[in-house]
Amino acid sequence: MTKKEERQKKQQEKLAAELDRLESMMIYEKQYENCGMICGIDEAGRGPLAGPVVAGAVILPVNCRILYLNDSKKLTARRRELLYEEIMEKALAVGTGVVGHKRIDEINILQATYEAMRQAIKKLDIVPDILLNDAVVIPQVEFRQVPIVKGDTKSISIAAASIIAKVTRDRMMTEMDEQYPGYGFASNKGYGTAAHIAAIRKQGACEIHRRTFIRNFTGAGK
């Protein structure tokens, strides 16, 4: 076998393995395919010290295969961006919901996450019949819901929603870095890295910091 043939064989084996992995992530989609339109729901930004929480809602076509689709946290930023574009191109419907830092402080992060998810669902161009959620049951939602623990690694619909939410929020935080320099929002996306916490203690909080998240830092909650 030539080196070219060996490369081709390895590429074929890699592709076959990826297709098998994607097939394993369609278990829930196949289980509920007779229920109608399936919508995956996930969020990004529950843990950061600054910025909004963002939810994604995605309805994919039946038997949709998007190579390398996975939990957004397991992907590089470049891969997420590429998958974001492919999801937007192939999805039947995509909705996003954004709840800002002030609202998070007002009602707490869990309720803010639910609010963002409800917004995302309402922005879909197609009304879903069943929701596949990453671990949670969303209050005040009339549709049937299936909470799946670690759903972003087990469902292509939820994985797609996680990427939409993550990329949307990351882009917002990169823009915030220009408006509020010195905190490293373009790199840390608002998460509590050592450099970010040091910046808060040195500069104080900026407009988009979540006061209820940073009050334990010296002078940060004022």
Image (cartoon, rainbow, N blue to C red):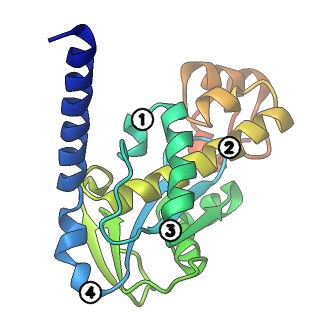
Query: Mark 2 and mark 4: span between their CA atoms?
Result: 34 Å
Q: Which mark is residue 199?
A: none
* Quadrant housing the C terminus: top right
Q: Amino acid at mark 2?
A: Arg
Image marks 4 and 1: residues in contact by CB distance under 8 Å = no
Q: Mark 3 or mark 4: which is in front? A: 4
Query: Mark 3 and mark 1: span between their CA atoms?
Result: 27 Å
Q: Along the line of sight, which residue is nearer the eye, 168 or 59?
A: 59
Q: Which residue is mark 1?
A: 75
Q: Position of residue 102 (x, y in %)?
A: 70, 59
Outermost residue, top side: 3
Tell me the crowding category of disc 1: few under 14, some 14 to 19, or many 20 or more residues within 10 angstroms, Cα based: some
Q: Which residue is mark 3?
A: 111
Instruction: Kindly identify the residue that appears in the image at 77 percent across and 40 percent down.
Output: 176
Q: Amino acid at mark 4?
A: Cys
Query: Mark 3 and mark 4: span between their CA atoms?
Result: 28 Å
Label 2 vs 4, first from the N-terminus: 4
Q: Secondary structure at mark 4?
A: helix
Q: Which residue is mark 4?
A: 35
Instruction: Kindly identify the residue that appears in the image at 64 percent across and 62 percent down.
Output: 98
Q: Which residue is mark 2?
A: 171
* Quadrant housing the N terminus: top left
Image marks 2 and 3: residues in contact by CB distance under 8 Å = no
Q: Amino acid at mark 1?
A: Leu
Q: Secondary structure at mark 1?
A: loop
Q: Amino acid at mark 3?
A: Gln
Q: On the rendered structure, is 62 left or right of 104?
A: left
Label 2 vs 1, first from the N-terminus: 1
Q: On the rendered structure, is 24 left or right of 96?
A: left
